[in-house]
Image: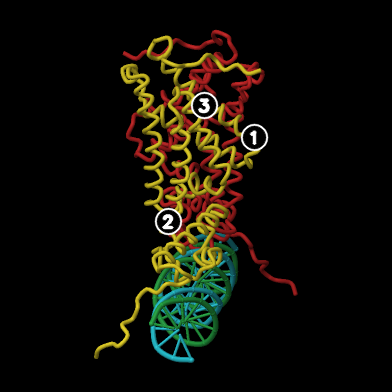
Chain colours: A yellow, B red, C green, D cyan
Amino acid sequence: MTRSKPPAPGRRFRGLDPQERQRQRREQLIAAGLNAFGGKGYHAVGVREICAEARLTERYFYESFANREDLFLAVYHHAIGTIRAAVMRALGQPPRDVQTMARAAVRAFLETLRDDPRLSRILLIDALTVSAEVSRQSQLATQSFADIVGSLILSLYPQLPKHGVDAQLVANGLVGSTVYLVMHWAFNGFKAPLETIVEHCVLFYDAAGTEAERRIGQVAAAGKPPPARRG
Amino acid sequence: MTRSKPPAPGRRFRGLDPQERQRQRREQLIAAGLNAFGGKGYHAVGVREICAEARLTERYFYESFANREDLFLAVYHHAIGTIRAAVMRALGQPPRDVQTMARAAVRAFLETLRDDPRLSRILLIDALTVSAEVSRQSQLATQSFADIVGSLILSLYPQLPKHGVDAQLVANGLVGSTVYLVMHWAFNGFKAPLETIVEHCVLFYDAAGTEAERRIGQVAAAGKPPPARRG
DNA sequence: CAATGTTGACATGAACGGTTGTCAAAATGT
DNA sequence: ACATTTTGACAACCGTTCATGTCAACATTG
């Protein structure tokens, strides 16, 4: 019973290794999922439609993903990665003052969402209603952003807790104002100029800083610029 | 062809008129929908489950609603009405200064959501993913709240537009911070004391006011209290 | 009690999505 | 050229949900 030709479990096809081909298929499916989910919403898209968009058949769907929710999770993490990369790139510029860095981070966030509106739907809307597990992960991801902001606030104004102000709640509120402004901006087709939204987002960060100083009783923290006059 | 006994299309049952019985059934279904949708989410609840919860059969469901989305819309408007009533009642107290009224409104908002956590899910999460029509109506409802805040800001600081600040965007950001703080609060089981959340919500309103004054260049608006020190 | 409106339990059928399986054709290495 | 893997198109199965329909039992009025 010796097999003269042992089966070659993995042949090169189209000049690509099996793993590489599977990786490509997986990416195609994620791209198709981003498109479909981001366009019509998770609950309005079926596996068949995703496969058609990816130019693949159902078999390859279940080769890479256990089910539709599993694909969404991958799409979601892809989207998170896109945002994170953009923000990190903005923050990786030569060190500057806090206000400038915050502005750059917010601008990168808004630019990324405007340049790919599908991300907004994935990250801000669908992530909450796909399943309990996904919404939990979404909460954690957003919370990690908010935690960074909270730590920053606390490092700038360490005495805040002594004055009854919870830096983490302030951070959550700031994230909320930013997210909501973005949602509104996106919902109206990104008609308003990006810089207008950026300025109004950072307005809240400035305002929170000033309010923190008021609560603490000190006059000014390091690096706070004078009121922005434009003209 | 005279009918000796013309059919009586509407007999009293249980001492109730047909319309009254139907009205009760409709209310039962809305209550059941609030319970089911608010507990497990719109997309995880079917018509059968709602009917079982309402102690009614499918026939009576389609007697009052065209489909599941139609019921959700009714539940949504019911929830909005509950919130609106609570806020209006809080604002209907003897006239006071702006800060006190804002605090009372926010407190009423938070109390209502805490006392009925199902409202949070209906209003803040599911409303965005049921259908395009529902999310449109949800946007309009939230916007009407934000518009009130925006008008208030503009009346307090009429010169804001001259300084490059859009009162409507500020209002949206404030609504966003409040909504997000509530969402976070609700998601963690309302563990934090209500007053803590209230105070941090109004913190943003205070902060926005101070920031508006900074941008305008004036020193203080009417009625702004000194920084809140707590003992 | 009889007549009839009313109700509840359940059946039914269409439609849909998820998931697995079949099969022939295309592509590839030897 | 051949054997074999890979691929695509599609069928099929299963379960679910929506939406409507059927029918007997019940309640109420006269």
Give the distance between the C-alpha atoms of the residues marked 1 and 2, in whole angstroms: 46 Å
Q: Which mark is residue B35?
A: none
* Label 3 Cα neighbours within 10 Å, binned few <14 / some 14-19 / many ≥20: many
Position in image of residue A118 (x %, y %): 55, 49
Report how many numbered discs are placed on residues in the image: 3
Q: Is residue B16 visible?
A: no
Inspect the image, locate mark 1, and give the three-letter code of the amino acid beneath it: Ala
Q: Which residue is mark 1?
A: A192
Query: In the figure, B186 relative to A75: above or below?
Result: above
Query: In the figure, A58 relative to A173: above or below?
Result: below
Q: Which residue is mark 3?
A: A202
Q: Which mark is residue B53?
A: 2
Foreground tag (1 vs 2): 1
Position in image of residue B130 (x %, y %): 53, 52
Q: Residue furthest right?
A: B1
Judging from the image, what secondary structure is the residue with disc 1 in?
loop
Q: Is residue B136 visible?
A: yes
Give the distance between the C-alpha atoms of the residues marked 3 and 2, in whole angstroms: 47 Å
Inspect the image, locate mark 2, and give the three-letter code of the amino acid beneath it: Glu
Query: In the figure, A93 relative to B154: above or below?
Result: below
Judging from the image, what secondary structure is the residue with disc 3 in?
helix
* Label 2 Cα neighbours within 10 Å, binned few <14 / some 14-19 / many ≥20: some
Residue at the (43%, 44%) spot, across then down: B118
Tell me the subunit letter for badge 3. Answer: A
